[in-house]
Image: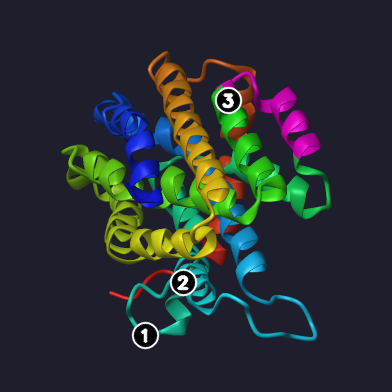
Amino acid sequence: MSNQSTLQAAIKPLQDELLNHEIYGSINSVEAVQHFMRFHVFSVWDFMSLVKRLQRDLTCTATPWTPPTNRPAANIINQIVLGEESDDFDTGKVTNAISHYELYLKAMIEVGTDPIEVTKLVSMIQRGQNYAEALDAHQRVFGESIADAVYDFVNDTLSTAEKGATHEVMAAFLFGREDPIPKMFQTIIDNKILSADKSLDSFRLYLQRHIDVDGDDHGPLAFAALSEICGEDEIKWEEATAAAKNAIQMRIHFWSGILKIATSKPYSKVTTKVEERINKRMTKTANQHLKKIPVLAE
């Protein structure tokens, strides 16, 4: 059995558990979508740290520039960065270019979900605060309304991006993100609510784009990159397998935490002081982000 086949066999039970999680069927109303997006957006944001770490390792992002040592892997990660950070949705118009994170913020605003929780965390890090300290400070303020699993997931992602070896980061990126996303998102998009409410158009666009791109392009490209990086080194394949298992387990933990808090109370009802503050900030925050986000051409 090849190293690739051994890895895939080792993670198959966890993949099945992830793809059969009950969270997908729970997203069956606008209120459920609002709850889901509040938490899921954190994984949309932290995903880019894995991408950028891989770009740093597999290409040259420093000056003076030097050629990449692994040209196929460099090509693959550059394609992924282009699509995730500045997607023009195959329109050929640079004015339509938007990161998938920004598209998600736009979708949140359209459905009536305030992005203040995630943008507050991002702004702390933009100001130079260490991610671990920022997460701790954020949890002290918002932890009353955000599942601990969200913080666990983001901390694990950023720790992997900062401390993992290249092949471990690639494995986490591939099997925790690119590989399962098309099937996970297809299950969500199949829920009737996604086609029944116009306020969910941008959310549906986000999901469909990932189904199309990750399934057809990014997933296969990332697996090819992992094979390039690990080569015939069995130790690297073992470490990649462990990283893949951890990434999938953390996603399951993430989903379970979201499901628990999302089903405990309707999003539309104010139940905590934190949510009251969030609601008061809604208009200002939403308008600021909406102005910065381009509208895709029809």
**Which residue does the numbered mark 2 point to in the structure image?**
76
Kindly identify which residue carries mark 1: 92
Point 53% across, 79% down: residue: 71
Quadrant housing the C terminus = bottom left
- Label 1, label 2: how far apart the Cα atoms are: 20 Å
Q: Earlier in the sequence, mark 3 or mark 2?
A: 2
Q: Which residues are magenta?
A: 132-148
Q: CA distance from mark 3 to mark 2?
A: 41 Å
On screen, residue 69 versus residue 224, left or right, reads: right
Looking at the picture, which amino acid does disc 3 mark? Glu
49, 23: nearer the viewer: 49
Is 9 one of the magenta-colored residues?
no
What count of labels does the image hold?
A: 3
Badge 1 vs badge 2, beta-carbon distance below 8 Å? no
3 or 1: tag closer to the N-terminus? 1
Q: Amino acid at mark 2?
A: Ile
Residue under label 3, please give it.
Answer: 275
Could you tell whether 71 is left or right of 181 in the image? right
